[in-house]
Image (cartoon, rainbow, N blue to C red):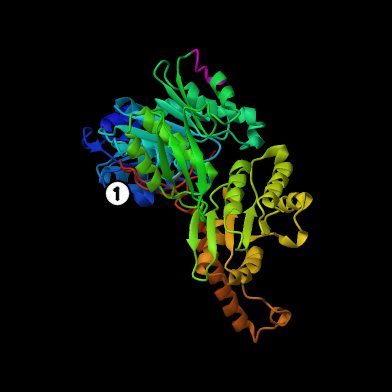
Amino acid sequence: MRLSIAQITEFSRALTIVPARDSHHIIQRLSWDSRTVQPDMLFVALPGDGFDGNDFIIEAFERGAAVVIASRQVTEAERLVAEQYRAALLYASDGQLALQRLASAWREMLDAKVVGITGSSGKTSTKALVSAILARAYLTVSSLGNRNNEIGLPATVLSASPSTEVLVVEMAMRGFGQIEELCAVARPHIGIVTNIGPVHLATLGSKDNVACAKAELVAALPRDTGIAILNGDDPYTPRIRELAQTFEREVRVMLFGLERHNDIRATNIDFDSDGQPSFDLLLPDGDARRVKLNLQGKHSVYNALAAATAGVQLEVDPSQIVWALEQVKPVPMRQVRHELEDGTLVIDDSYNANPDSMRAALELLGRLPKTRLRIAILGDMGELGVEEIALHEGIGEAVYLNEVDLLVTIGAMASHYGIGAQATGMDSTRIISCSDIEEAMTVLVPLREKAPIMLVKASRFMGLERVVDYLIQGYQPPPVVTEAQDGAESDGIEDAAEGGAAEGAAAEGAAAEGAADKSDGTRDAAEGGAKGVEGAVTNDETGQKDHE
């Protein structure tokens, strides 16, 4: 962004508590995490579950913030510090809304094409592919990491510079109206819907309702000039077109997929020993171009086709489309391969999971060499509503059908994977149910001597990246306290007091460390800590919650 303090005040509709020394001073970066504030930044103080950014307003000024937007009544101390640093202190009762208003105004000033991406699975990977392709021909800015919600998307818009030619934004939702809200800020010209799957059923109730929520992106595309890029093999695509009235509003629809009716499709798909696909990319010019992805699984072919369609619509040279597709590597915690020294292969797909993405991951595992022990380490999937047991058992069936050698489940709901796998035909000796990560590690560590392939996947709240970290860095089980040790008497009151103090200090240190880990950059953000927004194509994991 490139806005004066006067424009920030006007566009955010905030009240001025302490005026700036120079209202025409230009601000180009923002943050909502006080720890990342640098001189001349805008700091937007947002309340969060664990921390309230308003508690760090003074710290933001001390770090050099030129403007602060508070979202609660400011204190006299904050006012005095703002005056001391000759910085602007503003107040908006709803900080998130102020941020969105600011982003919407900046979006209006940009002369850039905006590509919006949503879908039940593959949004972030598709965004990386789209950005890589469009960056071959345009100055492109895309969402940092998984900034795909009501805070992250406005921040992405504000990260664009006046010279930005294409802006690529990821859009997620938890319910109806949320993608519509994001579109009101981003105002996309092109909308990509990757697929429709069983996500957020606890709130939406059905896949048809998921399609309705995702269709909000297509419905927001401009009449006559909008372009919808849809999965032609997805059974809910006709429903999306109906809901968005693409025919009546003359929105151009481009279909991608494997079937012959699609505008852009893939044929002759092969997989190498690592599960990475090669395919013939068929573009509208009629020529077939061979593509070899650095990504894994059949689902990556669909993501690549969606991205290629965006490239075609924005007239990127076909040779550049192919080159860009072949350069993209997995996004962190999304099917990232880790080859360990003992020969173990860990596939880290721990970022998130829903039934469709879980099946895709198991399909990938099933394609890997059968000469090695293939282990699926699976945790709970969340937000599946009344169908959660049946959906978990259905994944168990997929475990068996993909010939997984060993299933290790983590969590109460994940135990239903085992039930489904056994009901389909998997031997019970090949199913191990664990209550937590520590129990699972006692099972997994000895298996490393077999140099197995280990797939790790679960919904975000399960935190199975800890399993990956333990496998890579080494796992030390907690010390076992024997009955004799537990019952041993202290040598005296002084020793007991010293021991209690030591335990208290250790507990305090562990609690502090745990709190730091839990925050993961989320101290000042309602949805996750963020770096200062930069106008560049970046892929940064911010700890922000990833809605679908």
Q: Is residue 246 magenta?
A: yes
**Percent position of residue 243, x then y:** 56, 20
176 vs 355: above or below: above
**Residue 401 at x, y = what percent?**
69, 49
Magenta highlight range: 243-248
Nearest the viewer among 147 and 170 is 170
Residue 398 in the image, given as x and y percentages of width and height: 68, 47
- Residue 135 visible (yes or no): yes
Q: Nearer the viewer, residue 545 or 516?
A: 545
**Above or below, comparing residue 45 to residue 10 in the picture:** below
**Residue under circle 1?**
38
**Secondary structure, magenta segment, majority class:** loop
In screen coordinates, is 336 left or right of 200?
left
Vertical placement of residue 271 versus 189, above or below: below
> Residue sitting at 41 percent across and 29 percent down?
286
In the image, 133: left or right of 416? left
Residue in the picture at 49% in, 70% down: 341
* 105 left or right, relative to 353: left
- Label 1 sits on a secondary structure element that is loop
Instruction: Residue at 69%, 38% (x, y): give it.
Output: 385
Front residue of 147/354: it is 354
How many marks the image carries: the answer is 1
Is residue 495 shown left or right of residue 151? right
Q: Amino acid at mark 1?
A: Gln
